[in-house]
Image (spheres, rainbow, N blue to C red):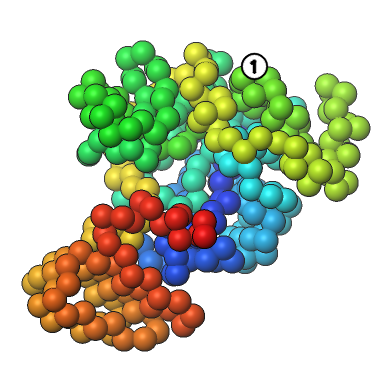
Amino acid sequence: MNTSTFKAVILAGGSGERFWPLSTPERPKQFLRVFGGASLIRQAVTRLDGLVSPKDVFVVTAKNLVAATRKELPEIPKCNILGEPMRRDTGAAVALGVGLAASDADPVIGFFSSDQMVANPKAFRKVVSKAVAIARRKQVIVTLGIKPTYPATCFGYISPKTRTFVEKPDAKTAKKYVKAGYLWNAGMFIARASTFRGAFAAHAPELECLTRFETDGTNRTDGTRSRSKAIAGGGLAKLYSALPKISFDYAVMEKSKNVEVVPGDFGWDDVGSFAAFDKYFPHDSRGNVREGPCTVVEADGNICVARSARISLLGVKNLVVVTTPDSVLVADKSRLTEMKRLFSR
C-alpha cells in the first residue's frame, strides 16, 4: 500500500490501575514486558511495520510519560510524542492526535491502542490496509470489528449491518448484541483528517479546536496560525482544563452516521486484567499460574505473581496474589473488573 498519506497515532495515556501493582501511574500497562516478551507499546508500533514509516508514527500520552515513551520508542521522532497536560479520556486524545498527525495533504489517520495484544500481525496489517483504502475513498470513520467470544460489558459494539455503534452495554444487552451478530469495537479508528474534524465539529465542537493543534505554530491555509501558536506556546494546559472528560466513543462514534466496520480475525486481545495470565501462561495440575517463587498446597485456579516476596497459598481458590517490592495485591478473580475501586479511597 502507499504509505505516504497514512499516519498512525498510538494512544498511550494509561493510568496503571488494572495491573497494579505490576503497573503504576509512572509505569502503566503499556510498558509491561509480561505478554509476548516486548512491552505492549513496543508491540503496538512493531505490528505497524510495512504500513507506516517511523516518521509518520505519533504517540499521544500523559505528560509524565513522555520521557519513558521516547526511551521505549527511540526510532520515533521526539516531536511526534506529545504529552497531554491532564487526563480527559480518549475524546480529547483523538482530537489532539488528529492535530498532531494532520497536514495540508489531508492524510488518512489510524488510531491504535498502546496496550492490546495481536496474535497475528500479518492478518492485522491486511485488515488495516483494507480499512485505510475505504477511508481514502469515502468520507467515513472506519472501525475494526472483532467477533465476540463472550457477551462482554467492557467493550463497545457495532452492528456490521446497520453500522450502529453502541458503547459498553449491560450484561443483558450484551447477550442480545452477540446473538444479533454485533462485533466488538477494538478501539481502532481510521479516517481522513478532514473526516475526523468534521465529526468533531458536528458532535463534539468543544474538542474540535484540538484537531488544529500544531507543535510549531506553522501557518495553515485555513487561517488558524494564531490559535496554533497559542496552544503550542503553553496554552494547551489552560485549554485542557476546560474540556469535558469523555471518550471518543461517546463523544463521536455513537452519534455518527458515516461509520463503517471492517471485520477482523487477527487474535485481538485487550489483556484488560490479571485474568489474562490464565490465557498466556502455563498452569500446574490444579490450574494455578505461578510466576516467580510461589508455593501452592491444595489450592486451585489461582494466579500468583511474585516479583519480590515469596507467595505461599494453602487451601484457597480463584485468587490473584501479586507481590512487588513495595506492594501486595490479593483479589478474588471474579472481582478483577473492580480494580479501580482500590484507587477511589
Please, is residue 242 above or below residue 84 in the view? above
Residue indicated by mark 1: 202
Residue 215 seen in this snapshot: no
Q: Residue at point 88% right, 46% down?
A: 233
- Horizontal relation, residue 140 to residue 120: left or right: right
Counting other residues with Cα less than 10 Å from the Cα at mark 1, is it few (<14), some (14-19), or many (20 or more)?
A: few
Q: Residue at point 81% right, 43% down?
A: 238
Q: Nearer the viewer, residue 18 or 37?
A: 18
Residue at the limit of the structure toward the right, as seen here: 226
Image-quadrant location for residue 106:
top right
Q: Amino acid at mark 1?
A: Ala
From the top left corner, tell me how far across and down residue 321 is, in percent. 31, 72
Image-quadrant location for residue 127:
top left
Please, is residue 229 above or below residue 61 in the view? above
From the top left corner, tell me how far across and down residue 191 is, in percent. 55, 26
- Horizontal relation, residue 190 to residue 335: left or right: right
Q: Nearer the viewer, residue 139 or 304?
A: 304
Name the secondary structure under disc 1: helix
From the top left corner, tell me how far across and down residue 294 is, in percent. 25, 82
